[in-house]
Image (cartoon, rainbow, N blue to C red):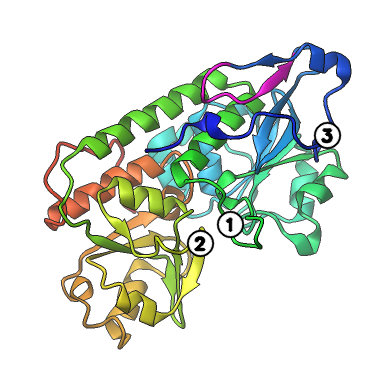
Amino acid sequence: MTPPVCCTSRGLTKPDRARGPLPAVAAAMTMVLAGCTGSAETTTDAAEVTVTNCDERVTYPQPAELFVNSPNKVAMVLAIGAAEQLVGVAGIAGDEDVLRKVYGADVVDDLPIASADYPTFENVIAQQPEVYVAGWSSGYDEQTNLTPDGLADHDIAAYTASYTCRQQSGDARGIMPPWQALTTDLANLGDITGHQRQAQDVVADVEARLDALRSAPQPEDEPTVFLFDSGTDDVFTSGSFGGPQAIIEAAGGRNALEDVDDTWTSVSWERVASSEPDFIAFVDYGEQTFEDKVEVLRNNPATKDLPAVKEERFHNIPISAWTSGPLNIDAAEQLRNSLEQWDLVPDSDIEPEHDLTP
């Protein structure tokens, strides 16, 4: 059962690392938003909002202008209706068509593209956003000081996507289950942009469609699904804290890497083979095409004789739907349909709301 968003800490347990604690007068005027999708405190005079981000209480201007990195995080902002508050966008090259399908060509074609790839520190500063939305290993760069602390020196607050929050034990990422990470981010970004009601509607839609998937007929033995992101020498895939874990489970399958407490990680070819996957899902992006990845599987001694490879039990879904974002629910519906077509899960009346096929 997916924990509600309100399971996150609500107490102001740590000083704000971006803009300092709320002034005493403003704090006295704090209003706590009701419901599990709102853990924010809004100050009416200071036009600020405080939310829990990566287990810290952080204060942001509200409604904030945003610079957002990567298509899944851009999708979050578009889903809650805050496109007009984007002053910079980076890293969505190759995913424009997917975003157009769901959010409209007029909206996506009007996005303020600051960089086709990951942004530089200069890219972000030049757009003068109030908040930079990114993540560890997906938008921050410690070598160039593109970090929450580095941005704070330029009066820019950082919002870190929840699925990339670092664990206390080291650099491994993920501190909450994937669906909770998604709904937490939607609710927090709704608070930061002033689009709370739209964010609540998106969360409700995701949860209703997730309930439908969970209520669909389930297999007696869950098919093992291996996520192939990319790879030649080893394979880049995703563990228990990544969006794929949530998507595969919702579709009726079992993530081959469910025992790995990380988001995105690399494993050996022997690990791929030993998982004996019933189905292989691909992440569509970058220079290694779907056809290239299939050829790698067919030619590698560890995988060429796997039944899933021989029978081509494959499905290809864009990266913006695999990484934590509102398109995760579309990916789950689409994967469920593919598993049904291969008789790996029982037939159901699940129909994908959007066709994300590249």
For residue 170, above or below residue 121:
below
Look at the picture and state if 270 lies above or below 187.
below
| Residue 19 image label | 3
Q: Position of residue 9 (x, y in %)?
A: 63, 34
Identify the residue shown where x is 30% and y is 33%. Answer: 211
Q: Which residue is mark 1?
A: 173
Residue nearest the viewer, comparing 318 with 88 = 318
Q: Identify whether 10 is placed above or below 337.
A: above
Q: CA distance from mark 3 to mark 1?
A: 24 Å
Secondary structure category for the residue under label 1: loop
Residue at the (36%, 73%) spot, across then down? 293
Q: Which residue is mark 2?
A: 264
Q: Which residues are magenta?
A: 34-43
Percent x, y for residue 244?
Answer: 40, 54
- Residue at 60%, 31% in the rendered image: 188
Quadrant of residue 104 in the image? top left
Label 3's element?
A: loop
